[in-house]
Image: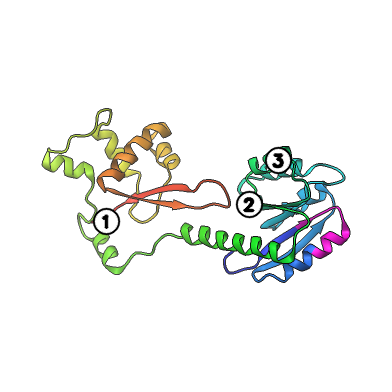
């Protein structure tokens, strides 16, 4: 999305407002209007097909904006982000919208400059998520070390060799080996993936991964999705 335009669906029951807001969006670099909708049902239907961001009015003639938010969230990771643009500023509506993890709430009437500022801020957030989600390319020296025999020195190996670094209470060396075997030196893996490979609970996998991260045997990174908390990824650390 960092290279292509961010596709926007404008939702408002007022035809004049829809046209005005579409014009505002088209004037912001990096954004393109993918469509417009005057009802909540139409908004939900259009949001399921190639839309990145919805400008959502909360007062719609059929279903409420809050209901639209609930339905969009059932789309999961395929659903669009939502920026509320509404004259509704009562505490109940605002709280319900924020609970649905909208990216912003802009109260009508607003100026073109105000919407532009919100959209530009959103574009920066999208770019930051995209950059953070990219895996860091390995330098030639790192690749050479990975190819070399013994290029990955794990905590388990260090424990066996030195005998001076006992594992924390509750951790076992055979289980540690299983966790290490489930990890890769290049591609990060999540707690859920490690837990599944090792046939253990996520809580148990997290304890071992946390220990390995503390000792420097693995590298921790983050993968940012469309919304919500970033996913934590783990990979073996080169020497």
The residue to which callout 3 is attached is 70
Mark 3, secondary structure of its residue: helix
Q: In the picture shown, does residue 206 fall above or below 84?
A: above
Comparing 73 with 59, the one in front is: 59
User: Any magenta on residue 15?
Assistant: yes
Give the residues drawn in magenta, as a range: 10-20
Q: At 25% across and 34% down in the image, what residue appears?
A: 174
User: Any magenta on residue 161?
Assistant: no
Q: Is residue 52 left or right of residue 219?
A: right
Mark 2, secondary structure of its residue: loop
Q: At 75% across and 41% down in the image, what residue appears?
A: 90
How dense is the environment of label 2, judged by Cα within 10 Å: few (below 14), some, or many (20 and up)? some
Q: At 73% across and 55% down in the image, what residue appears?
A: 55
Q: Is residue 188 left or right of residue 30?
A: left
Mark 1, secondary structure of its residue: loop
Q: In the picture shown, does residue 187 fall above or below 211?
A: below
Instruction: Determine the image quadrant of residue 138.
Output: bottom left
Instruction: Determine the image quadrant of residue 7.
Output: bottom right
Q: Count the numbered circles shown.
A: 3
Among numbered discs 2 and 1, the one appearing first in the sequence: 2
Q: Disc 1 and disc 3: Cα gap in Å? A: 44 Å
Q: In the picture shown, does residue 67 fall above or below 218?
A: above
Q: Disc 2 and disc 1: Cα gap in Å? A: 38 Å
Return the x and y of residue 54 as percentages of the image width and height.
71, 55
Among numbered discs 3 and 2, the one appearing first in the sequence: 3
The residue to which callout 2 is attached is 103
Please identify the quadrant where the N terminus is shown.
bottom right
The residue to which callout 1 is attached is 238
């Amino acid at each position: 999305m960092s290279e292509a335009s961010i596709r926007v669906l404008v939702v408002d029951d007022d035809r004049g407002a829809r046209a005005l807001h579409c014009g505002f969006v088209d004037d912001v670099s990096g954004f393109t209007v993918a469509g417009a909708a005057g009802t909540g049902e139409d908004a939900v239907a259009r949001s399921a097909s190639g839309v990145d961001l919805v400008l959502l009015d909360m007062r719609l003639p059929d279903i409420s904006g809050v209901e639209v938010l609930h339905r969009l969230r059932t789309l999961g990771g395929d659903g669009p982000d939502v920026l509320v643009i509404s004259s509704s500023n009562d505490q109940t509506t605002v709280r319900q919208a924020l609970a649905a993890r909208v990216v912003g709430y802009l109260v009508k009437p607003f100026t073109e400059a105000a919407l532009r500022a919100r959209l530009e801020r959103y574009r920066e957030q999208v770019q930051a998520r995209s950059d953070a989600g990219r895996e860091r390319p390995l330098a030639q020296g790192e690749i050479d070390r990975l190819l070399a025999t013994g290029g990955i020195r794990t905590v388990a190996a260090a424990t066996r060799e030195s005998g001076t670094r006992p594992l924390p209470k509750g951790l076992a060396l055979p289980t540690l080996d299983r966790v290490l075997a489930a990890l890769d030196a290049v591609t990060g893996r999540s707690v859920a993936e490690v837990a599944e490979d090792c046939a253990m609970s996520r809580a148990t996998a997290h304890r071992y991964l946390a220990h390995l991260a503390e000792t420097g045997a693995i590298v921790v990174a983050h993968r940012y999705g469309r919304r919500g908390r970033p996913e934590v990824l783990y990979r073996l650390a080169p020497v």
